[in-house]
Image: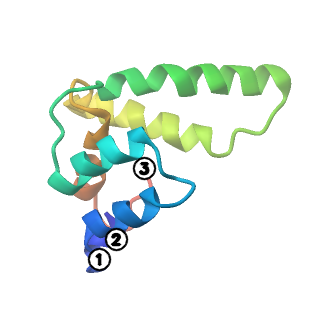
Amino acid sequence: MVAERSGLDPARLFDALGGGYAGSRLLHVKGLRFVAHDHHAASAAKLMIKDPSFALQEAERTGTPADLIQPLHSLFCDLAGAGLGDLDSSVVQAYLESRPVGSSG
């Protein structure tokens, strides 16, 4: 979203990322979805709540900081609460695009 709003071609960005250590099948598949703004369900966004929930529980149990997990968990909970949970996890793109600039939650 930042790349697109900055005038960068998202397809070229994903190509560049895919050529480095970030390259993976997941980056390729989700990158195509982000470029096309295609959010039809392949892996429902609401399923993305389970793993961060587990990670937060384990972090609390073990006394481990979870600074990056909490915002991710909150994002997908909010997204599901907005009625987008049955769409593909790439719908996070549309959800963030719909929020006001400077909105943090």
Q: Residue furthest bottom?
A: 7
Front: mark 1 or 3: 1
Q: Which residue is mark 1?
A: 8
Query: Label 1: few (<14), some or many (≥20) within 10 Å?
Result: few
Foreground: 41 or 63?
41
Which residue type carries mark 1?
A: Leu
- Disc 2 versus disc 3: distance between alpha carbons? 21 Å
Query: Which numbered dot is residue 42?
Result: none
Which residue type carries mark 2?
A: Ala
Q: Is residue 76 left or right of residue 20?
A: left
Q: Label 3: state its secondary structure.
A: loop
Provide residue 92's location: percent of width, then percent of height: 31, 44
Q: Label 1: state its secondary structure.
A: loop
Q: Which residue is mark 3?
A: 105
- Disc 2 versus disc 1: distance between alpha carbons? 5 Å
Query: Label 3: few (<14), some or many (≥20) within 10 Å?
Result: few
Foreground: 91 or 10?
10
Q: Earlier along the polypeptide chain: callout 2 or callout 3? A: 2
Examine the image and state in which quarter residue 15 appears. Answer: bottom left
Provide residue 14's location: percent of width, then percent of height: 36, 60
Foreground: 80 or 24?
24
Is residue 69 shown above or below 61? below
Front: mark 2 or 3: 2
User: Is there a contact, CB below 8 Å, between mark 2 and mark 1?
Assistant: yes
Q: Which residue is mark 2?
A: 3
Which residue type carries mark 3?
A: Gly
Q: Residue furthest front?
A: 19
- Disc 1 versus disc 3: distance between alpha carbons? 26 Å
Residue found 34% across the figure and 24% down from its top: 46
